[in-house]
Every structure is written in C-alpha cells, then in structure tokens.
Amino acid sequence: MAISTFEASPVAEVDRAAVVEAIAGEEAATHMTTRARPAVPAVPADAEPSLRVRDLRTPSLAGVTLDAYPGRVLGVYGLIGSGRTEFLRGLVGLDRIDGGRVELYGEPYRPRSPAHARRAGVVYLTGERKIDGIVPQLDCATNVVLPVLSTFTRFGVLDRRAMADRAARLMDQLRVRGNRAAPVVGLSGGNQQKVLLARTLAQEPRLLLLDEPTKGVDIGVKDEIHRLLRRLAADEGMTVIVVSSEEEEILDVADDVVTFAHGRCDGVTRPASELSPAALRHTAWTDSTKGTNV
C-alpha cells in the first residue's frame, strides 16, 4: 500500500505528487505533475482594469491602491493583520468605506451591503466556512441557491425542481461528493467548501473575491479548486481576486501578485511566475517594516 511505503521512507524522499495520488487519486497527481503553467503574458499597456482602486480607506485600511483585470487571477498576500481580508470586506460592503475611489468596469462603485455588491456582479467567499459560510442543517442544494432564491420564485411560489436542477449542475461541475440530500454539515470539509464555491457561481459574478479558498481542505481538493479558479479567469473572462496566507497557493493560482502591510497596498504588481515562496515572503516582511500599524 502507498501509505506503508510512506511510513518506510525518509520524508525527504516522498514527493508532493505521491502524496496527492494517495489522497486524491492518480488523475489529480498526474495533473499536478504535468500542468507546468506557462508564463502568463503581461497585461497589455492599453488594457482597462475591471477593478480600479485608489487610496481606499476603511476603519481597517489606511490606503489601498491596485488594479485587477478581467481574465486574470490577482493574488493578495500579506502577513496577519496586513488588511488583506479587510480589503475584500470593503469591496463587498461588509466594512464601511471612509475614503478613496473604487471603479468597477469604469463606473464608480461604493457598495452599501453584500446584496448591493451582488447586484453589481461582485461576489465574496468567506474564509470562515463554519462561522458565516454554510448553513449546517440545510441540504446542499438549498445552501447553493440561498442568495438567489428569488430567481426561482414566481407569483410567490418556489420552483423547487428548477432550484434543484440548477444546484445539481453546479455541484456536478465542482464534483461535490457525498449525500447531497442530507444536511451539508455531514459532508467532508472539502466538499462543504465546494458547495460554497457552487454558491458563488450561482450568483454569476463578474468579480469573484475569495478569502482563503482552500482553508481546511485536503491537497486533492485544493488542486481542484485552483484549477477551477484559473479556468474561470482564463476561459470565462472573470476577474478573480484570491487572498491567501499560503505563499505556495498564491503562486500556484495567481497570475499577478500584490502585497499588503499595515492596511496599505502600493499597487505594485509582480508576475507570479517570477516569484518564489521565499521571495514573496521576503517582500511581505520588507513591506511590513515600512510605516506603522493602522
């Protein structure tokens, strides 16, 4: 068995692909070892950002400037307390915006609430799945369509078949495994996270904001989620912003990377293909020594 081989081998001799295969199967391991992401072309000089942020200030942010582009994944990295999560909360209307300017597809954007953000095409995936993500005792389909239930209602009557069909298609797309008819809390952590991702897709985002999207999932599910996010950007033209505390995750999933420190971001974007985990960590530490805490 693979696991006994691991037990008998020095840790240094067990590569990541072998671990992926043991956990998630040969398909995931093969993908991981053969994907060899080509360097993503730089953003054309004349390209227009889908999201333009200038000197954004909230109760937790002291000045954030950056651009995000359609068809690309922007990775946001920073140390704990850098303001990375608070940035997403401001964009989705959970935190008050006190100053600065935000433009979404060339139009001024200042969300008053998550519902307002959703109507503008901005959708947020929380980093706290168990606290403010899943509704534990509801089944998977209901969890998926909760934010868009009104689209399945006609003259006050809920079209349960249409609701279930839509949820099933999304969960099939994300390969949600387990008893979908039972309360979602009965699924594994990775499948619960896939249900939440299905919920974000049900809202048809133009700008998708994800906070620690693979927190608490195994390495196989993490790889599946990264592939999905890259596909949403590259194939469907979505703008994706990923916040993560893991350097490897940022470099695996992102096209471009910015760093946060002390509630600030200077907007300097670095190609993920030119960074290593050590270099990204060094950049964050260097930025964190500049200025003072908010």
Image (cartoon, grey):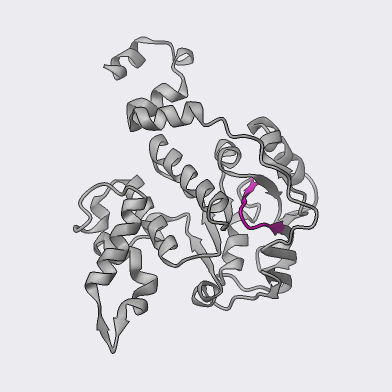
In the drawing, does residue 213 fall left or right of residue 75? left
At horizontal 73% and vertical 45% (from top left) the residue drawn is 42
What secondary structure do most residues of the magenta stretch adopt? strand
Residue 162 placed where, x, y %? 27, 71
* Residue 290 falls within the magenta-colored stretch: no
* 118 versus 153 height, above or below: above
User: As rendered, which of 147 and 30 lies closer to the eye?
Assistant: 30
Using the image as rendered, state which of residue 150 and residue 48 is in the foreground: 48
Q: Is residue 69 magenta?
A: yes
Q: Position of residue 31 (x, y in %)?
A: 45, 31
Q: Position of residue 48 (x, y in %)?
A: 73, 62
Quadrant including the N terminus: top left
- Residue drawn 23% across the image and 48% down it: 178
Per the rendered image, the range of residues in magenta is: 67-78
Of residues 190 and 141, which is closer to you in this image? 141
For residue 134, what is the image quadrant? Answer: bottom left
Q: How many marks?
A: 0
Residue 159 shows in the view:
yes
- The one nearer the camera, 13 or 224, is 224
Residue at image x 45%, y 38%?
Answer: 223
Q: Residue 71: image x %, image y %?
A: 61, 54
Identify the residue at horizontal 51%, vertical 48% (top origin): 231
